[in-house]
Image: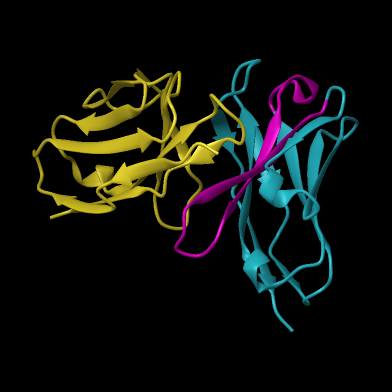
Amino acid sequence: ENVLTQSPAIMSASLGEKVTMSCRASSSVNYMYWYQQKSDASPKLWIYYTSNLAPGVPARFSGSGSGNSYSLTISSMEGEDAATYYCQQFTSSPLTFGAGTKLELK
Amino acid sequence: QVQLQQSGPELVKPGASVKISCKASGYAFSSSWMNWVKQRPGQGLEWIGRIYPGDGDTNYNGKFKGKATLTADKSSSTAYMQLSSLTSVDSAVYFCARGATVVARYFDYWGQGTTLTVSS
């Protein structure tokens, strides 16, 4: 299966700080998808087809990458952005998720 | 609006089976893949498999073959997941999630989750 490795596992950022998290695939993928999950809630679609923001996602978020390497960036950290972010691929079966990056507010 | 309403928490004994439901509304149930995802406490997400209610076609993560059985009832717009021979490692929150687009490579709507506890 295609293993997705997210880094860092945990990070903290101050308000207004730029944040970048990474997702590396063991095999090349066509697209990467990202979800945001807050405690005791269901995941929410955040970014689809690598760089498209889901409805309602603030424009300070962006996604990029190709092949084996993808990233999610927040241009300026807000308090509501504290959450765990998961990447996901379905270029090959089975569909797999990364282990998540937990983003905390410093 | 699209909604996925899952059944309530379950407490079952080891070795037993359980059937979790996911009632869909707000869209054409038969025309979208329905996926199931497992999340153990404090852990990440695992894809179990998916079903296309229109014709009952299923795809499973090999890890869950023999453990999970996916079905769907078009008349009630409800998807089901049965888990068998339960052990403590099956204790988790289980989500249903709709596959977005015809190709369904990602999920655009999620249920609220069903907590399964396996304990004697």
B107 horizontally vs B44: left or right: right
> Which residue is located at x 33 percent, y 44 percent?
A6
> Quick one: B7 or A10, which is closer to the camera?
A10
Work out whether residue B107 or residue B74 is closer to the camera in this orientation and state it: B107
Which corner quadrant holds the C terminus of chain B?
Answer: bottom right
Q: Nearer the viewer, residue B24 or B101?
A: B101
Span highlighted in magenta in the image: B26-53
Identify the residue at image location x=25%, y=22%: A59
Where is residue A7 drawn, in percent x and y?
Answer: 27, 45
Which residue of the protein is positioned furthest toward the right in this rendering?
A: B75
**A10 displayed left or right of A97:** left
Instruction: Please identify which colour was used for chain A in the image.
Output: yellow
Picture quarter containing residue A4?
A: top left
Q: Quadrant of the rendered structure where residue A29 is?
A: top left
Asked if residue B33 is among those painted magenta in the image, a careful observer would answer yes
- Residue at the spot 50% in from the left edge and 36% down from the top edge: A2
- The colour scheme is by chain
In percent of width and height, residue B70 lies at 80, 43
Q: Is residue B12 left or right of residue A65?
A: right
Using the rendered image of the protein, determine whether residue B6 is visible from the camera's viewpoint. Answer: no
- Is B5 on the left or on the right of A19, as rendered? right
Residue B75 located within the stretch drawn in magenta: no
Q: Residue at x 50, y 65 (%)?
A: B41
The extreme bottom residue here reads: B120
> Where residue A14 sits: x, y (%)?
9, 48
Vertical order, B120 against B54 (above or below): below
Residue A27 sits above or below residue A30 on the image: below
Q: Is residue B112 above or below residue B10?
A: above
> Which colour denotes chain B?
cyan
Tell me where residue B112 appears, x and y as whole percent: 59, 48
